[in-house]
């Protein structure tokens, strides 16, 4: 695939000290408790603009590194100004921004990426990946220290980069305004709402009417689904009016190649339905014409597919069955850091939830540290684990701890017997997933 750089792998094992999850979370809690202190200090350190760090993520199943390629000065900062230190830390990568003079932490954000999933695949044992990634931070007034840390599924940490950015001397590319922006739903001003941005891919000029219709259609799918419809004043949805050279989406496994705006393609990580974007830098360049916290790519294709990665982006196909379900499911990954709760479908990842480790995703547990999950939401009479019942049983809707989730049938547990993260059910997030999404929307709106 286009984002892989094949190479022979040397059998060299590098290990980092294992940090127990409880210790890890305790340290994070002490850091996140400082967020209130930063709540009123955005203007002390940043201007109303976005700095994007564009880099390559390089590695295989045993090792990884990053190589900064360039910086971009983007549009206005649409993220939260009240809570500059992220409270959840569901991601596999952390970007931390420090004041260079005092070494004070002034901004942090976690996110996940396709590389993290790639590391667990069979391909990663024989090939080295070189993938485009980037992250947005508020544009600093003065020199700052940037630190990138990677966490594996066992929460071992490795610093990938630690260096400085000087807004006066570091070469930084300007943004280019190229595209019209459609406003599909306006709840509040940027910074007082979560700003969701749709980008179309595979729509040629001849598909103009279809594009506009689809952007409105998918906005309705989001806004008719809870909790978005219940928090409409805290949600903004816009769309880029951007056209591709050709109609359709690339399907490498069927020898179909299409020239599109974002170069999206099926068969990512050798999984037929996994539809992802192969040009992340370009994707953000296109997005710069609008405020955004979350990017959703609407792909012009009849083939079932999609994908979603926490604080990264998500994709959905536009025709065929269940696009309403697919977009809200993938947005569950994108903005909520929610895990897949199914375990019967084929996936490429292997050992994604190691034994003896509590997953970071809020809607699955291995019971290693269930106290940190939805235990407080359970009725005291609910057994843990909870036995499954049939649909006609009065307890079918009961919140519990049901075995099977996170791609495996044993050892990983989910909160409910039915949920949009578990099976094809539109507008049916279980109470745990619903609560997580509500908290995220509130986070961006404050």
Image: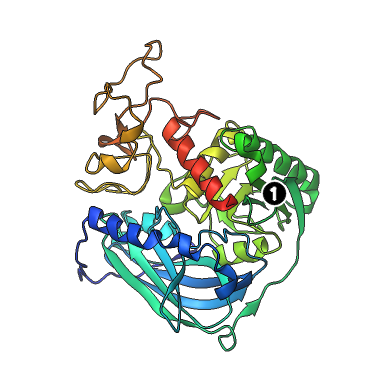
Q: Nearer the viewer, residue 30 or 339?
A: 30
| Residue 235 location (% of width, % of height) | 64, 45
Q: Specify whether 202 is left or right of 51.
A: right
Residue that badge 1 annotates: 188
Place residue 224 in its image quadrant. top right
Place residue 52 in its image quadrant. bottom right
| Residue 352 location (% of width, % of height) | 30, 48
Q: Nearer the viewer, residue 357 or 276?
A: 357
Q: In this view, does 25 lie above or below 416?
A: below
Report the residue at 30% width, 70% height from top. 8
Report the residue at 56% width, 48% height from top. 315
Q: Is residue 237 visible?
A: yes
| Residue 49 location (% of width, % of height) | 64, 70
How was the colour assigned to the protein in this rendering?
rainbow
Q: In this view, does 331 lie above or below 199?
A: above
Q: In this view, does 274 lie above or below 377?
A: below
Q: Can residue 422 be seen in this view?
A: no
Q: Which of 334 and 141 is in front in this view?
A: 141
Q: Specify whether 245 is left or right of 354.
A: right
Count how many numbered circles sit on residues in the image: 1
Q: What element carries label 1?
A: loop
Report the residue at 75% width, 49% height from top. 183
Most distant residue in the bottom direction: 169
């Amino acid at each position: 695939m286009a984002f892989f750089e094949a190479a022979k792998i040397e059998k060299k094992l590098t290990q980092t000290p294992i940090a127990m999850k409880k210790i890890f979370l305790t340290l994070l809690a002490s850091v996140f408790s400082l967020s209130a202190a930063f709540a009123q200090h955005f203007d002390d350190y940043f201007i109303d603009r976005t700095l994007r760090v564009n880099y390559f993520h390089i590695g295989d199943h045993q090792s990884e590194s990053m190589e900064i390629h360039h910086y971009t000065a983007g549009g206005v900062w649409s993220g939260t100004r009240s809570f500059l230190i992220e409270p959840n830390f569901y991601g596999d990568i952390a970007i931390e921004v420090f004041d260079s003079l005092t070494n004070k932490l002034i901004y942090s954000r976690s996110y996940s990426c396709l590389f993290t999933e790639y590391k667990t695949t069979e391909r990663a044992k024989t090939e080295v990946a070189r993938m485009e990634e980037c992250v947005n931070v508020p544009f600093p007034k003065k020199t700052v220290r940037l630190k990138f840390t990677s966490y594996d599924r066992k929460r071992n940490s490795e610093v990938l980069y630690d260096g400085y950015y000087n807004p006066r001397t570091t070469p930084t590319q300007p943004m280019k305004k190229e595209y019209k922006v459609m406003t599909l739903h306006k709840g509040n001003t940027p910074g007082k709402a979560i700003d969701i941005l749709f980008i179309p891919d595979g729509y040629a000029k001849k598909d103009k009417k279809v594009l506009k219709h689809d952007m409105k259609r998918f906005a309705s799918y989001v806004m008719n689904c809870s909790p978005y419809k219940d928090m409409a004043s805290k949600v903004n949805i816009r769309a880029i009016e951007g056209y591709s050279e050709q109609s359709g989406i690339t399907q490498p496994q069927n020898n179909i190649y299409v020239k599109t705006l974002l170069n999206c393609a099926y068969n990512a990580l050798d999984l037929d339905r996994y539809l992802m974007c192969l040009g992340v830098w370009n994707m953000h360049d296109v997005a710069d014409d609008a405020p955004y916290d979350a990017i959703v790519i609407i792909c012009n294709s009849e083939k079932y597919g999609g994908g979603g990665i926490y604080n990264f982006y998500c994709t959905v196909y536009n025709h065929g069955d269940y696009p309403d379900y697919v977009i809200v499911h993938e947005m569950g990954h994108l903005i909520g850091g929610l895990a897949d709760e199914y375990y019967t479908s084929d996936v490429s990842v292997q050992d994604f939830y190691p034994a003896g480790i509590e997953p970071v995703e809020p809607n699955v547990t291995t019971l290693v540290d269930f106290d940190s999950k939805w235990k407080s939401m359970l009725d005291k009479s609910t057994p843990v684990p909870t036995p499954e019942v049939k649909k006609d049983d009065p307890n079918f809707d009961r919140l519990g701890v049901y075995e099977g989730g996170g791609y495996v049938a044993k050892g990983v547990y989910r909160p409910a017997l039915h949920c949009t993260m578990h099976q094809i059910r539109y507008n049916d997030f279980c109470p745990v997933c619903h609560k997580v999404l509500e908290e995220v929307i509130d986070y961006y709106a404050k």
